Image (cartoon, grey):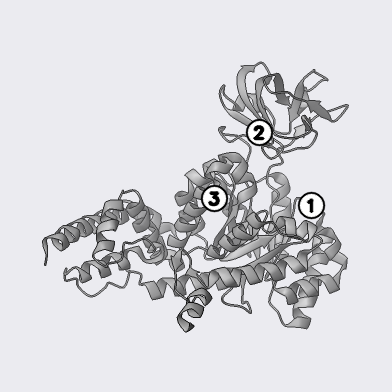
Amino acid sequence: MSENLEKLALELQKIEAFMLKAEKAFGYLLEKVHPSHHKNAINLLHYLALRSLDIRELQDALHAEGLSSMASSESHVMGQLIAIQQHVGISKPETEEEVMSYAASKQSLHNKSVALFGKKEMEAVPYIMITFDTSLASDYDKVKSLLQSGMNIARINCAHDEESTWFMMIQQIKRASKVTGLSCRIYMDLAGPKIRTVIHKSGKLKVEEGHSIYLTDESQLNGAKNTIGCTIPAISSQLKSGETVLFDDGLIETRVEKIEEGRAKLRVLRVSSKKPFIKNEKGINFPDSTLLTPALTDYDKQCLKFIQKHADIVGYSFVRNTKDIIELQEVLGNSKKPALVIKIETPEAVKNLPDLLFCAMREENTGVMIARGDLAVEIGFERMSEIQEEILWICEAAHLPVIWATQVLENLNKSGLATRSEVIDAAHAALAECVKINKGIHIIHTIEALRDILARSGGHHVKKRFTFRPLAIASRFMAT
């Protein structure tokens, strides 16, 4: 063995020892996961241990020797590490049963995706989830067309409509599925806490950069000037000076200057809207704050009775920590449980992602949604690209299917014409197991366009590992 290979072998052995140490240290997490997740939970621990290290120099050295640099080993990290060691001349005993191979990891993620989302016609294209509009409750032909165009999962948002409308939607889906022979899972999103502005009288408040406004509890508005109410009780007591408060999907940015009795004084830092107003019932985001608002509301608990009876999957909004997941698991109890999808839409959820995944894996059938709308507002658009990648990597290590959500081909869906940036974004969605499209007047055309984009993009990679299918550019050149 050359001197270079000896150095590499030593580094690889150190990493393996560190990963095994992590597996032992966090063994209590493995004891609680469902047996079907045991191997992938071990793989997740190994991956988290690896990614806590800086191995960039080692990766360059491995690549220079013609060896794998571990760059695309999320799903089978220990198996890949052992294979590299064998190639540098380290004799290893036969691979233990617990070690996940590349082939086994691909099959594992495929099986978990089918268990969560059902069967689909085109294996090369991710599942497609469609958000249902109220009108679809009475439009069988449109529902049938959605299925025939490629819809695999129908999403019903419990924040809108009521049980009678949801039931009609589900009946249309079941009827269309039976007639076409095409599978379609029912996904229902819990509404979660409604964090909105409350502005009486005119219904809007004019704001200007550099000026101050006040935020208070909805019950304490009392017609005060330059004051906005919030639907969260005792909101001012949950904020601290220096924290950011965002209004209307981040169009207006403020910072807490001072906490006063019953209200918070906010300094307006940025107004990105052409119309400098904060309007009634607009969203508020608190990216720096730890709110006491429960993720599971009383309304959500009422909806769960219907969801347990009629839905295949429940989407859990505003998840921040493991307590939120445990509360939902306790409410569902031992009765019929829909599969669980946890929605990552806050900085706290990103920070706690490993713990959330281990907790979610206590259930046999689970997945993750990257809710990019609220998440982008909360963490900042500058970090969104990086964070969504990290979520994808960590979920792949856990073998948990991911739903890529929010504003996918939104302009095409609304106007009939796609923008360049949204087509590039849609192509990137091929890294996920499922892609969600919102409601829109051009929904059929949008599904067809998305399937075409995903098929083209997906042919060049498996997850984030690029593959070399023949390139038309290269083939034409070689034929000359």
138 vs 56: above or below: below
Q: Residue at x 47, y 75 (%)?
A: 474
Q: Amino acid at mark 1?
A: His
Between 141 and 444, the one lying in front of the other is 444
Tell me the crowding category of disc 1: few under 14, some 14 to 19, or many 20 or more residues within 10 angstroms, Cα based: few
Whether residue 175 is visible, yes or no, is yes
Q: Earlier in the sequence, mark 3 or mark 1?
A: 1
41 vs 230: above or below: below
- Can you tell which of label 2 and label 1 is closer to the viewer? 2
Helix, strand or loop at label 3? It is helix
The residues bearing labels 2 and 1 have C-alpha atoms spaced at a distance of 23 Å
Q: How many marks?
A: 3
**Label of residue 160 in the image:** 1
Indicate the position of residue 331 as horizontal and vertical percent values. Answer: 62, 53
**Label of residue 326 in the image:** 3
Between 471 and 211, the one lying in front of the other is 471
Helix, strand or loop at label 1? It is loop
Indicate the position of residue 262 as horizontal and vertical percent values. Answer: 69, 19
Q: Residue at x 68, y 42 (%)?
A: 193
Query: With 9 as the anchor, is 435 left or right in this view?
Result: right
Q: Which residue is mark 2?
A: 246
